[in-house]
Image (cartoon, helix red, strand yellow):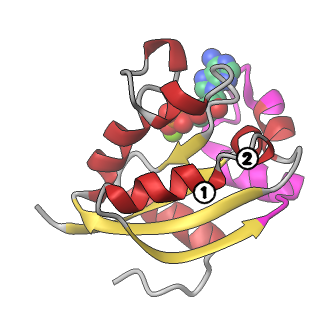
Amino acid sequence: MALERTLSIIKPNAVEDGHTGAILQRFEQEGFRVVAMRMAHLTRAQAEGFYAVHKERPFFADLVQFMTRSRVVLIVLEREDAIAHYRKVIGATDPAKAEPGTIRKLYAKSLQENAVHGSDAVETARFEIGWFFPGHDLA
Ligand code: ADP
Ligand code: MG
């Protein structure tokens, strides 16, 4: 297993509902180290560019609207096998299908307002980390 980095976002619904601390604590309990972190109120251009891979999907406009509604927390996390382990900890995209105890099962409101983002592959993580933390050391 390789040491990896992944881009996490605590989405607007989870920040609004006061779950930031609990989610960060869970990441640390799961062995992730916080490499970089900041709060941001995303612009439309930032959200559209971040989710460009989904721009043809019917939910794209609503997703951008949601992600720019209020502040998010942008976090670079590091761990052995970070990308796969993180996806396991957050659970399925649709909280109705997420395993008990996963972050999405605990804190999501809906398929759209599913509390957290996570990178899905090494190359995606590289793009996503660079998108929000330009010039960051990805080594
Ligand atoms: P994940 O965040 O699990 O990687 P995707 O990359 O497929 O999921 O989708 C990105 C985000 O878009 C999801 O986290 C969710 O907020 C939203 N989303 C995905 N599918 C739908 C859908 N069918 N309807 C509404 N929102 C969706
Ligand atoms: Mg995705």
Whether label 2 touches label 1, CB < 8 Å: yes
Which element carries disc 2, helix, strand or loop? loop
Residue 119 seen in the figure: yes
Checking the image for residue 21, the label placed there is 1
Query: Foreground residue, 19 or 136?
Result: 19
Residue bearing mark 2: 18
Mark 2 crowdedness (10 Å alpha carbons): few <14, some 14-19, many ≥20 = few
The answer to whether 8 is drawn above or below residue 13 in the figure is: below
Checking the image for residue 72, the label placed there is none
Where's residue 34, x and y in %?
46, 73
Q: Is residue 101 left or right of residue 134?
A: left
The part of the chain drawn in magenta is 40-62
Which element carries disc 1, helix, strand or loop? helix
Q: Is residue 111 left or right of residue 127?
A: right
| Quadrant of the image where one finds ligand 1 | top right
Which residue occupies 44% across, 14% down? 97
The answer to whether 40 is drawn above or below residue 10 in the figure is: below
Which residue occupies 28% across, 48% down? 85
Residue 124 seen in the figure: no
